[in-house]
Image: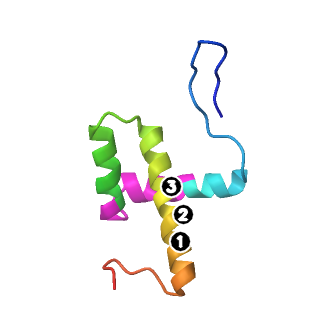
Amino acid sequence: MNWDRGARRGQRRIKGGRAQVRKQLHMAALSAASRGANPDLKNFCDHLKARGKKTKVALTAVMRKLVILANTLIKEDRLWQPIAP
């Protein structure tokens, strides 16, 4: 959601969708990116922060990657493996 008025450009916020799903994704992304539960996602998050992205923006990107990963696993009817098949 944007917070714009006229020529003023405000901060963007995440709002809408299902709050419970968003909360669960946030916790999963936080665990994967900060605690190193998933080294690939941790490296991705660290890379974004090194490029100057804010922590919440980087976590939102990790959340999106988790959704894409979950959709792919469901589509292919397989379990997650640390090394891609």
Residue at the disc numbered 3: 63
Q: Which mark is residue 70?
A: 1
Q: CA distance from mark 2 to mark 1?
A: 5 Å
In the displayed structure, does residue 12 sit left or right of residue 51?
Answer: right
Could you say where residue 43 lies in the image, as x and y percent from the top left? 28, 55
Labels 2 and 1 touching (C-beta < 8 A): yes
- As rendered, which of 71 and 23 lies closer to the eye? 71
Residue 6 image offset from top left, x and y in percent? 65, 13
Query: In the image, what residue occupies the spot 41% across and 34% down?
Result: 54
Q: Is residue 82 above or below residue 48?
A: below
| Mark pair 3, 2: CA separation | 6 Å
Residue positioned 61% across, 58% down in the render: 24
- Residue 74 is situated, as x and y percent measured from the top left of the image, at 57, 80
Q: How is the image coloured?
A: rainbow
Residue 28 part of the magenta-drawn span: yes
**Number of residues whose C-alpha sits closer than 10 Å to that of mark 2, classed few (under 14), some (14–19) or many (20 or more):** few
Answer whether labels 3 and 2 touch (C-beta < 8 Å): yes
Give the structural element (helix, strand or loop) at label 3.
helix
Residue 58 sits in which quadrant? Answer: top left
The amino acid marked with disc number 2 is: Val
Point out the tag, 1 or 3, that comes first from the N-terminus: 3
Please report the residue visible at 33 percent of the width from the left and 80 percent of the height from the top: 84
- Categorize mark 3 by other alpha carbons within 10 Å: few (<14), some (14-19), many (20+): many
Amino acid type for the residue under numbered disc 3: Met
Residue 5 location (% of width, % of height)? 67, 16
- Label 1, secondary structure: give it: helix
44 above or below 82? above
Disc 2: which residue: 67
Q: Is residue 6 above or below residue 26?
A: above
The quarter in which the N terminus is drawn is top right
